[in-house]
Amino acid sequence: MYEMVGSVKLIEETQTFSSGFAKREFVITTEDKYPQDVKFEATKEKIEQVDKLKVGDHVKVSFNIRGNEYKGRYYVNLQSWKIENAGGEVSPALDAAGSEGASGGNLDDIEESPF
């Protein structure tokens, strides 16, 4: 399990594929000495957590690193499984979800990767 703290910079629309698989991507800007913009994706029911975000929210993202190969090319995705308030400005919906999700983000959810 990995965690990263930052401010939400961008929230993409949900993408649904012909297979029925859906994902939603979002970007946070880290608080490092040299800030970086890092893209995450949420899948399945975790998309609901992204729906509650707004640009500027200060969040802590718990995520897994997922890698796969497709036609000789290798890809890495940062798959979020819990998004919670990291203090500072945050939308009220996320604040409520973060307190609910603190006990609700169990490790069984991690095993549900599409890769």
Image (cartoon, rainbow, N blue to C red):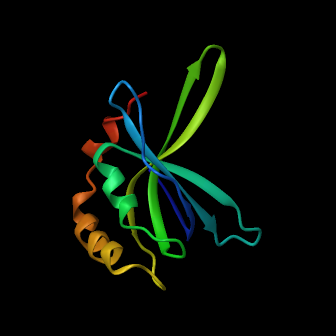
Farthest residue, direction bottom: 88
Above/below status of 89 relative to 29: below
Above/below status of 60 relative to 72: below
Which picture quadrant has residue 92?
bottom left
Relative side of 8 to 85, left or right: right
Q: Nearer the viewer, residue 4 or 17?
A: 17
Residue 100: image location, x then y, percent = 22, 69
Which picture quadrant has residue 52?
bottom left
Residue at (36, 32) in percent of width and height: 21
- Tell how many labels: 0
Residue at (25, 43) in percent of width and height: 108
Residue 8: image location, x then y, percent = 54, 68
Residue 80: image location, x then y, percent = 43, 51
Above/below status of 38 relative to 44: below
Relative side of 62 to 5, left or right: left
Residue 86: image location, x then y, percent = 45, 76
Residue at (52, 51) in percent of width and height: 40
Q: Which quadrant is the C terminus positioned in?
A: top left
Relative side of 85 to 72, left or right: left
